[in-house]
Amino acid sequence: MRASTIMRWVTGLGEAFLAIPFLGGLYVIGSGYSLLGVMFVLHAITLILAIRDYSAKSGSIVGLVTSAIAWIPVIGWFMHAVSAVLLIIQAVISHPKRHY
């Protein structure tokens, strides 16, 4: 499995957790919003790996945008949900690395 696929699973599941109404928000607020910074860095790493692997980049880009605007209550929840779905779909349909 490619590193970019593994990171898509990590960031997708992280976004899915943050998209849980109230609970995700409590964790973000409880961390002093630093959790959004951590997710931003993880999305940036995923994007770099996706570029290296010539694979889908849109999930990571949406995740970066989500991390930047997720402090807005309803928009943040919606963006976390969109990012989670997009990243998990991309992780599922990514092709395994071929060794020749």
Image: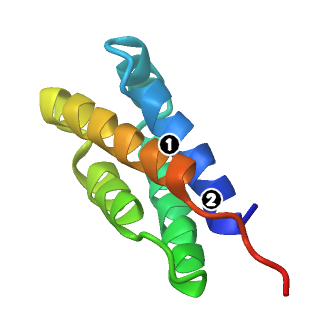
Pinpoint residue 52: horizontal percent, then vertical percent: 59, 85
Q: Quadrant of the N terminus?
A: bottom right
Q: On the rendered structure, is 32 left or right of 49?
A: left
In the image, which is nearer the foreground, mark 1 or mark 2? Answer: 2
Pinpoint residue 92: horizontal percent, then vertical percent: 55, 47
Residue toward you, 59 or 1: 1
Instruction: Determine which residue is flagged by label 1.
Output: 12
Residue toward you, 34 or 91: 91
**Local crowd size for mark 1, using a 10 Å CA cut-off: few (<14), some (14–19), many (≥20):** many
Figure coloring: rainbow
The amino acid sitting under disc 1 is Gly
Residue drawn at 73 percent across, 72 percent down: 97
Instruction: Determine which residue is flagged by label 2.
Output: 5
Secondary structure beneath disc 1? Answer: helix
Residue toward you, 40 or 95: 95
Q: On the rendered structure, is 8 left or right of 20?
A: right
The disc label shown at residue 52, or none: none
Q: On the rendered structure, is 13 left or right of 7?
A: left
The amino acid sitting under disc 2 is Thr
Residue drawn at 53 percent across, 74 percent down: 50
From this view, report whether residue 51 is shown above or below residue 81: below
From this view, report whether residue 3 is shown above or below residue 99: above
Residue drawn at 31 percent across, 33 percent down: 81
Of pointers 1 and 2, the one earlier in the residue sequence: 2
Q: Residue furthest top?
A: 22
Pinpoint residue 58: horizontal percent, then vertical percent: 33, 65
Residue drawn at 54 percent across, 35 percent down: 13
Secondary structure beneath disc 2? Answer: helix
- Image quadrant in which you'd find residue 57: bottom left
Residues at marks 1 and 2, CA–CA distance in whole angstroms? 10 Å
Q: On the rendered structure, is 8 left or right of 16?
A: right
Pinpoint residue 71: horizontal percent, then vertical percent: 25, 39
